Image: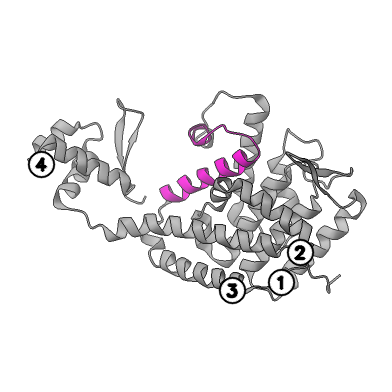
Amino acid sequence: MKNYKPPYTITSKMLSLSTSIGEALTKLEYEENRIITPRLRKKNRIKTIAGTLEIEGNFIGEEKITAMIEGKRVLGRYEEILEVEGVIEAYKSFENYHYDHLEDLLNAHKMLMKGILRTAGNFRNVNVGVGNHEGVSHVAPPHGVVPQLMEQLFEWLKTSDEHLLIKSCVFHYEFEFIHPFSDGNGRIGRLWQSVILYHWRKVFSAVPTESIIREHQDAYYKALEEAGSMGESTPFVEFMLEVILETVQKVGNKVGNRVGNLLSDNQENILELIRKNPKISAQKLSESIGISKRKTEENIAKLKQMELLQRVGGTRGHWEVNDGD
C-alpha cells in the first residue's frame, strides 16, 4: 500500500504556475498580519461557503450565510438551510483538521451532511455514476473497494515527497474519482484541498479558492472529465493551479490597493469622525471637515473600495470602520 502513487505527470506548466503561486503568496504574507484582518478572513470564509454551495446548486447567498453564522434565523427551504448549516459547521474546524488523517475527513463529512444523509461520515455502500448534462460521465469504483482506495490515497498523502501544492490538486481529483460518499463529495473534496493548502501556508485560511472555482465551474467539470479520459489527474492539476494563482492574486490585489493608497488628511478625518459617530451624515461630515458634500462622498466611495469603511443596515443604518480588530 505504501508504494501506491496516483497517476499524474509533472509538466512545465505546473512548475511555472507553482513558482508564480509561491511569489504571489510571499507578497501576500508580507502584509498578512497588518492587512488580512479578522473581518477580511470572515468575509472570505463566507465567499468560500457561498461558492462551494453554489457549485452544488444552492444559491442561498452571502447575506443569508452571514446571518446564519451570526446565529440569526433566515428563510429558505429546509434542505437548503441544512446544507448551509452543514458547510458552516464543517468549515468551523478548518484550522484544526489534520490533512493526512482519514478520520478527520470522515468527521468533516459527518458535520457537512448532518440531517441530510443517514450515512453521514461513512463511505457509500452502493455503486454510483457521476453525471453531467449529457448523462453519466464517470462510473465510480465499486463500493466494496472504497475503504481500501481511501486508505491508499491517505497513505500517499502522508508519505509522498511531492510538494503539498501539487498534492492538494492530485488529492482533489483522486477523491472525486473515488467518489467515496453517497452525497457531498464535491464539497468535501474542495474543503480538503483547502485544508492541505492551509497546512502548506497558513494564509490560505483567508484565500477563498472555492469561490473562484465557482466562477470557472464549467472549466472545473471539464478538467475533471479530461483527467478521467486521460487516466491521470494532470489536466485537472494544471487547472487547479491556475485557480489557486488567480485566487491568491485577487486577494493580493485587494491588499495591495489598501497598502499602496495612503490615506489623505480628509479620508483620515472622515474615518475619525465616523468612529465617534457611526450615524453621521455626509452633509455633517462635509461641514465638519470643511469640504464639499460631493468631495466627501467621493472620499467615502474610495474608503469603501479600499474596504476600510462599510455601510451596515442599508441607507438608514450606520457606518463601520474596519480597523482590523
Q: Name the residue tied to disc 3.
A: 15
Evaluate if marks 2 and 4 touch, with contact meaning CB atoms under 8 Å apart: no
Q: Which residues are magenta?
A: 39-67
Q: Quadrant of the N terminus?
A: bottom right
The residue shown at (73%, 33%) is 115
Q: Give the residue at the far right of this rendering.
A: 144
Q: Position of residue 76 (x, y in %)?
A: 59, 24
Q: Which residue type does callout 4 highlight?
A: Ile
Q: Quadrant of residue 136?
A: top right
Q: Name the residue tied to disc 4.
A: 289
For label 3, the SS is helix
Q: Name the residue tied to disc 1.
A: 9
Q: CA distance from mark 4 to mark 3?
A: 53 Å
Total marks placed: 4
Tell me which label, 2 or 4, sits earlier in the chain.
Answer: 2
Q: Residues within 10 Å of mark 3 (few under 14, many from 20)?
A: some
Viewer-closest of 233 and 32: 233
Tell me which label, 1 or 4, sits earlier in the chain.
Answer: 1
Tell me which label, 2 or 1, sits earlier in the chain.
Answer: 1
Q: Which residue type does callout 1 highlight?
A: Thr
Evaluate if marks 1 and 4 touch, with contact meaning CB atoms under 8 Å apart: no
Q: Main secondary structure of the magenta part?
A: helix
Evaluate if marks 2 and 1 touch, with contact meaning CB atoms under 8 Å apart: yes
Mark 2 or 4: in front is: 2
